[in-house]
Amino acid sequence: MASLRPGGWGQRASSLGGPLLALLMLGLAQPHHTPPNPDVSRRQPWDLKIDQALLQIHNELLGENLTISWISDYCYQCLPQELIPINKTPEEPSVSTAAVDSQHAVTLLVSNTKDNKEICRLHYHFGEFGNYSLVVGNLHGSIPKISCNITVNQSPSNSYLPIFFAFLIYVGFFSILALGQVCVNIEPIRNWLYKKMNPTETDRLINSELGSPSRADSAGGDLPAGVWSSASSLQRLRSLDTFRGLALVIMVFVNYGGGKYWFFKHQSWNGLTVADLVFPWFVFIMGTSISLSLSSMLRRGRSKWQLLGKVLWRSILLFLIGVIVVNPNYGLGPLSWDNLRIPGVLQRLGCTYLVVAVLELLFATPVPENSALEAPYSALQDILPYWPQWLFMMALEAVWLCLTFLLNVPGCPTGYLGPGGIGSFGMYPNCTGGAAAYIDQLLLGEKHIYQHPSSNVLYLTTVAFDPEGILGTINSVVMAFFGLQAGKILMFYKDQHRQIMLRFCVWSIVMGVISAVLTKGTKDQGFIPVNKNLWSISYVTTLSCFAFVLLLLVYYLVDVKKVWSGAPFFYPGMNSILVYVGHEVFENYFPFKWKMQDNQSHSEHLAQNLTATSLWVIIAYILYRKRIFWKI
């Protein structure tokens, strides 16, 4: 759920801005080991920022004007962008400096300015805060030839060390907690804690609201004889809350900045980073919760009309909280209709929840008293009775495909899925997102959607695009529906652990195969690339594949083998709405944020972001102990 920031579950404008890209540099092939004048090579006239290195260009071609251009490896089919012009020097070599990007490898183009003739093309991955020299000169020999070489004047810093140290600190902390857990397993201590925590009352409070799944349907007078009547049915599936909490904790960390590491920011266009995983996982587990919670409510005697009212109210609340409380356009000044962003993370959750919950209410059938039906029907008892739901979802996906690939978008090619800007070799600069952006601008207005999408970082796009837009919400519904299917598996095959895990495995394989076909196993060259900004169907199937695998592992460890309690992720998973809204509202307040001594330090950003994230986990734990659960 990204702070309703650029794009969503977590999408913040994670760029260093256009100026950095204008400075982005390209590298060289084999390092040259003869350094230039040390007095020159050590000069650092610029204060480097995070993800930058210093490059000094030595033009030893007397009387020649040079132009240095760059192309990032992560910029698909992009036009070369000028980095810096090098003026001719009739008497002595010249030296120019530029800050270059160190996130990804880049290709450097050195050209003669006069006739734009390419002199050399080099590929290099610069290191953060490193000092490099690019020497362009004549190669002495029988045949005149121009050479281009890069030397390392000052080694880059290891920007990943803070992650390693943070990992060691957390491992040490949780090792101490594990030791405490061993002590808790001592019978006298365990009995005392059990009486103090009163888990029966805690579960009653948790399961009293719609949207909070129980381990199974509660036993009681409303249940038919023999259906889920065991005492274990009163227990809650901890794996679901653990899964939800894991996605939520990663999302909070990403929203707070992720230590300013590129892989904790959203992908510029096609492909995946860690930040692109959490929103769909949250949507997935929401679908799972819908299946279990509605079934539980129906078994307790609640009518479908009563539940429909709760679904409508919850959806409206989610939408309003997203628009009014955590709207990112507060940063532009007082919230007004002129700059109100209508789409957003909670808004999409509200719409997705409404569609999937209503669909489940309309077509859900009572669970048979004996869930272990005879073959062959029993093998598909979680699918065949719900064929109207599958027809509806296929029709919905057909709508997405038709609008995406057949809608006529003025000034853009039909079916365009690219980022616009300098992508597609600059042929469609204002076509960012194709049909998805066109529908949002047509129905919502350009000023009411996100103004600074992640594509403007690398692809230099200038038009508004909303990653939580209308068209992508269709596939968000599909993602939640796959989660709904996971809930049905847990419900129909209760306590049949092998059957549950087998079906999770099969679903992950099916989703993975579909993704491989749609993407052709590539990042950019498939029929439908994996794209979080568009919420492409391949993005949904890929993340569903990951979700089924992750849920299988968590279910096995937490609910089957019980070797892991789900802590610490279990606690924020129990109060997901409170943690999400709270981390958004108090983002810029101490102790979640403070003034740093060095704003260009990964270690300080990482320490601040991990501290803020850990505080929310602690808050969630305290609320759990106090039996405070905010449900809407």
Image: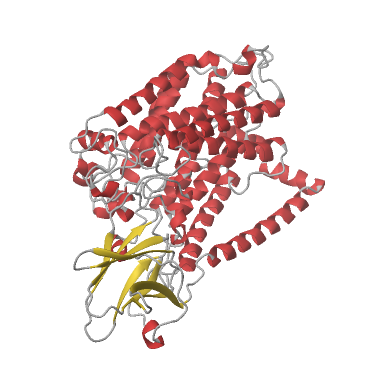
Q: Is residue 495 visible?
A: no
Q: Quadrant of residue 333?
A: bottom left
Residue under the point 34% across and 70% down: 99
Q: Is residue 551 above or below residue 74?
A: above
Residue 221 x/y as whole percent: 63, 16
Residue under the point 22% across and 73% down: 65
Q: Is residue 575 visible?
A: yes
Residue under the point 41% across and 75% down: 132
Look at the image and tell me in which quarter the C terminus lies.
top left
Q: Is residue 225 above or below residue 506?
A: above
Residue 362 x/y as whole percent: 44, 16
Residue 291 x/y as whole percent: 53, 25
Look at the image and tell me in which quarter the N terminus lies.
top left
Residue closest to the eye, 19 or 221: 19
Q: Is residue 442 left or right of residue 343?
A: left
Tally of numbered tags: 0
Q: Is residue 139 left or right of residue 284?
A: left
Specify how the rendered protein is coloured.
secondary structure
Residue closest to the eye, 182 or 199: 182
Residue closest to the eye, 486 or 416: 416
Residue closest to the eye, 98 or 447: 98
Residue 92 x/y as whole percent: 26, 86
Farthest residue toward the front? 142
